[in-house]
Amino acid sequence: MSLENTIIALVIGLVTGFINTLAGSGSLITLPFLMFVGLPADVANGTNRVSILFSTIVGAVTLKRQTKMSLKGTGIFIWPAVIAAIGGAWLASELRPQQMELVIGVVLVVMLIPLLLNPKRWLREVSGDYDRKLRPLFVAIFLAIGFYGGFIQAGTGVFFLSALVLLAHYTLPEANVLKNLIVAIYTVPALIIFVAHNQVDWSIGLVLAVGQSTGAWIAGRFAGNNKKAAVYIHILLVVMVVGSILQVFGVVNGGLEWMENR
């Protein structure tokens, strides 16, 4: 990899590490970049997991220290996602995705509605208890998000935050702790699957990882030291979802066209 692409990878990693830690959809930036530098689509999808693994570990640890959040009782959100992500990663390494752009676009449009219509629920300062009768629903939702995350990853963070804030009643900073922890855990087996299929370029993956881990640390410190962090994160979420929708539907060049060529 050239020096120019190395520098670009570090900068992109720094920006997307910050975005992924506090919101999500950074993969909609890193995946086209990995394709741009010459990686085949399947290798780009696998290589992207290297930086995600390191940055989510840094993000989870940093955010947890800042929020002092207890992880008691969070297994119902973590393990369904982890188990399903393994299946999603295996499918991504074996099969060609069909019409995923339209599916992702529709989901993002639907998800934009609660982001815009009920901002107060995103900005709560104290977490609340969720209805225990919803536990089967949580299992189903996190199985679905985990499977999608293992398969592609792009936009997964926004899905997790929506479920944790709107349904499980976590504050946005606490939801970010859980989101990063879940993604970090399921990325381990997912990455192993991609490595086993020779779909990881370690050289550029590790460069991105350095940038994203740095961005994740900065984001974690920002969220913990800024009283209006939830407001800024909510704005960032809206911006990333709108940007993702524009990209998916081809309004912004690049889209997710890489998936059609897999």
Image: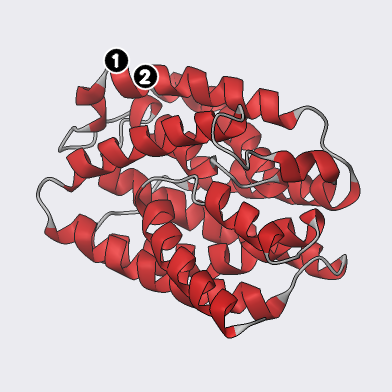
Secondary structure beneath dot 2 equals: helix
| Res 189 visible | no
* Within-10-Å neighbours for mark 1: few <14, some 14–19, many 20+: few
Horizontal side of residue 258 vs 214, given as left or right: right
Q: Residue at x 44, y 48 (%)?
A: 179
Residue 40 % position (x, y): 81, 59
Establish if 30 lies above or below 92: below
Marks 2/1 in contact by CB < 8 Å: the verdict is: yes
State the residue at coordinates (60%, 32%). 248
Q: Which mark is residue 15?
A: none
Amino acid at dot 2: Pro
According to the picture, the residue beneath numbered tag 2 turns out to be: 114
Q: Who is closer to the viewer here, 8 or 201? A: 8
Classify mark 2: residues with Cα within 10 Å, few (<14), some (14-19) or many (20+): some
Residue at image x 36%, y 49%? 176
Front in this rendered view, residue 195 or 1: 1
Identity of the amino acid at label 1? Leu
**Residue in the picture at 31% in, 67% down:** 62
Location of residue 172 with respect to 227 vertically, above or below:
above
| Drawn side of residue 226 relative to residue 76, left or right | left
Is disc 1 placed on a helix, strand or loop? Answer: helix
Residue 186 rendering spot, x and y as whole percentages: 62, 56
Q: What label sits on residue 117 in the rendered view? A: 1
